[in-house]
């Protein structure tokens, strides 16, 4: 459901708190940033910022002065309530209206104000919108609508770019803190570059309708650097397309016409944007373009091409393990080989190095998933469904636990219990060759039959010794019983799991939190009555040495109760996408012809911290992107399967 690649990777507008990514040589700035990140000793840090501010005024260092004001905003945001958002940055307008403010100071203030206003749209508002109004200030941003604020954002970016020509900072001045993503600008950027980069990030987040044909975009992606700008403008003119984003990119490219490396890098950003609009249709053209640039004489172009190509192969490669589509087979190995061939140039860019090392770790890390039916029979081999990657052998041990025994669901605590008990079986499965291809494989394994009881199977790609290798160990739980129980409306039917024949004399015990037992036996026809409202949802059925625990009328949750983790998910967006579902409610169970059907739809996902169900709505910053990418459509059909209504969710 997700678009391949991290399509926001080169969007120059990060919504999180931004700090200098490079050239952070001044220990004072480092300490300030650390304090804000950790939310520690903020009052003391604010005093340090104020002292640094006074020093900057005395020395006439406007860049440092602006930086102090920036950190002042961040600290105030942390120390005050949410409704003071615009009051905390009110000084920006004051400095912009002050005739004594230098062009350099005004340029930085325009950049800060553009970002401040824009991020208000991305902010989760704890109070009603009217609370954020500032009627006694020069501009009441909280009272404006989105188009009005967007107009102001564009104005401030334009002014920052206009003033940048006369705003000349001193040599070797660190301006990286002004950029949302300084580490993604692979050339020495001046204030004008920062203003244009920030503007492209802003415009990329706005609706951009580029009604170009697939063929036009393919031609643009594979075009030569010398002809790209004219070809792009010609395509836009022919299609009569007016795009703020493309206009800013065109301005940025013209600024660097005399610098081939910088120009080609910006062109690559434009081509990536075009590709990311329709990645499936444009995959071949994008691949051809990247492979050609692997031999670029410019290191930034060479490294960026390798970086993008690695990601394309990675995200295609992980698709193979989903449906085992042959077109994706071997892509992960290609990604690893690509990294090894171009490692030196990739390592010159810290962002690329860090990102790809994390993805390589995911590729090479052993992965095992085992599934088994939780109820098995005696004298019958147990079928295990296994998916694995980068594993040559599965080590396992089987531990028997008490039928009524409660063991912690926390992994470490459970493993400590299981590893300190004698194993019923301690062995391993040797897997077929192919562990070095990094692809996910699937097969069935046979586990020899076990006697009656309740078991945990612990498995790992390495020998199971103690909890030192806990991160690699997992477990599954199952029961061995010849009893089968079927729920009817007001009674249980107890059957022999092997023969299907009714079983009489089976005792049913309702498991209560008070540990008091209420027993009743099945009659000659195998039925056990159920009272209308049982005190417990869990029952135990006993026939001699055979015991079965059974959940009565327990609603099966269609989603796994998971929490967010970086091993299974690349980011929170993938987590929410994987966990999302629709809950549909209607006003009655049966309708007569002509009756109105009243229904309500609630979109649910998971809380990444607890795994609990949460409402997935616009309050979640990932919701709008999810709707835009997936465009969910609900169709309501009559008994003859004719569509009578549909509901489309709009972002």
Image: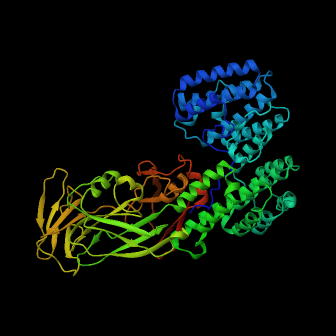
Q: Which of 647 and 346 is in front in this view?
A: 346
Q: Position of residue 393 (x, y in %)?
A: 42, 69
Tell me which corner region of the image, top left, top right, bottom left or bottom right, holds residue 338.
Answer: bottom right
Q: In this view, does 343 lie to the left or right of 480?
A: right
Q: Where is residue 574 in the image (x, y as percent from the top left)?
A: 54, 56
Q: Nearer the viewer, residue 7 or 410?
A: 410
Quick one: quadrant of the N terminus? bottom right
Above or below residue 105? Residue 214 is below
Q: Is residue 626 left or right of residue 306?
A: left
* Residue 593 shows in the view: no
Q: How many labels does the image show?
A: 0
Above or below residue 147? Residue 376 is below
Identified at 26% across, 56% down, the residue is 420
Q: In this view, does 82 lie to the left or right of 229?
A: left
Q: In this view, does 96 lie to the left or right of 551?
A: right
Q: Position of residue 557 (x, y in %)?
A: 38, 60
Identified at 61% across, 22% down, the residue is 48
* Residue 142 shows in the view: yes
Q: Nearer the viewer, residue 357 or 67?
A: 357
Chosen colour scheme? rainbow
Q: Where is residue 566 in the image (x, y as percent from the top left)?
A: 50, 53
């Amino acid at each position: 459901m997700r678009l391949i690649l991290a399509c926001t990777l080169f969007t120059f507008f990060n919504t999180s708190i931004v700090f200098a990514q490079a050239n952070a040589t001044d220990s004072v700035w480092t300490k300030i940033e650390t304090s804000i990140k950790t939310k520690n000793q903020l009052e003391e840090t604010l005093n340090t910022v104020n002292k640094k501010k006074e020093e900057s005024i005395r020395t006439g260092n406007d860049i440092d002065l602006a930086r102090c004001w920036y950190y002042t905003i961040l600290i105030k945001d942390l120390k005050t309530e949410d409704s003071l958002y615009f009051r905390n940055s009110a000084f920006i307008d004051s400095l912009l209206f002050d005739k004594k403010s230098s062009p350099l100071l005004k340029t930085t203030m325009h950049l800060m104000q553009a970002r401040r206003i824009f991020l208000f749209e991305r902010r989760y508002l704890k109070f009603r919108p009217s609370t954020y109004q500032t009627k006694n200030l020069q501009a009441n941003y909280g009272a404006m609508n989105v188009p009005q604020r967007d107009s102001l954002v564009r104005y401030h970016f334009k002014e920052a770019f206009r003033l940048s020509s006369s705003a000349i900072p001193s040599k070797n001045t660190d301006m990286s803190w002004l950029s949302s993503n300084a580490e993604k600008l692979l050339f020495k950027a001046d204030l004008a570059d920062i203003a244009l980069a920030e503007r492209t990030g802003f415009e990329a987040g706005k609706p951009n309708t580029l009604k170009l044909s697939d063929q036009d975009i393919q031609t643009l992606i594979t075009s030569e650097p010398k002809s790209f700008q004219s070809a792009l403008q010609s395509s836009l003119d022919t299609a009569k397309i007016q795009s703020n984003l493309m206009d800013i990119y065109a301005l940025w490219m013209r600024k660097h016409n005399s610098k081939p490396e910088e120009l080609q890098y910006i062109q690559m950003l434009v081509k990536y944007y075009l590709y990311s609009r329709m990645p499936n249709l444009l995959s071949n053209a994008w691949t051809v373009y990247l492979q050609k640039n692997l031999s670029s004489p410019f290191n930034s172009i060479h490294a960026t091409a390798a970086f993008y190509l690695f990601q394309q192969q990675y995200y295609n490669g992980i698709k193979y393990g989903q449906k085992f589509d042959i077109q994706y087979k071997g892509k992960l190995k290609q990604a690893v080989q690509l990294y090894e061939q171009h490692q030196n140039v990739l390592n010159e860019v810290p962002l690329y190095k860090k990102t790809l090392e994390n993805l390589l770790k995911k590729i090479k890390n052993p992965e095992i998933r085992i599934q088994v039916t939780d109820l098995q029979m005696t004298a019958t081999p147990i079928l295990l469904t296994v998916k694995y990657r980068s594993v040559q052998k599965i080590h396992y041990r089987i531990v028997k636990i008490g039928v009524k025994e409660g063991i912690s669901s926390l992994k470490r605590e459970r493993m400590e219990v299981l590893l300190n008990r004698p194993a019923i079986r301690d062995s391993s499965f040797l897997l077929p060759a192919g562990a070095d291809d990094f692809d996910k494989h699937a097969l069935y394994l046979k586990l020899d039959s076990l006697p009656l009881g309740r078991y945990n199977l612990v498995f790992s790609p390495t020998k199971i010794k103690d909890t030192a290798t806990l991160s690699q160990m997992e477990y599954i739980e199952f029961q061995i019983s010849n009893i089968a129980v079927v729920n009817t409306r007001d009674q249980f039917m107890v059957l022999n799991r092997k023969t299907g024949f009714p079983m009489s004399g089976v005792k049913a015990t309702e498991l209560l939190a008070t540990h008091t037992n209420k027993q009743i036996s099945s009659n000659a026809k195998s039925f056990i009555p159920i009272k209308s409202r049982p005190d417990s949802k869990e029952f135990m059925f006993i026939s001699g040495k055979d015991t079965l625990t059974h959940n009565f009328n327990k609603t099966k949750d269609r989603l796994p109760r998971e929490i967010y983790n970086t091993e299974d998910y690349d980011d929170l967006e993938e987590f929410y996408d994987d966990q999302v579902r629709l809950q549909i409610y209607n006003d009655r169970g049966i309708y007569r012809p002509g009756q109105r059907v009243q229904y309500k739809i609630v979109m649910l996902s998971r809380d990444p911290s607890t795994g609990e169900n949460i409402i997935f709505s616009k309050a979640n910053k990932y919701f709008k992107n999810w709707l835009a990418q997936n465009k969910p459509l609900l169709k309501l059909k009559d008994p003859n399967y004719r569509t009578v209504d549909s509901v489309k969710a709009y972002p």
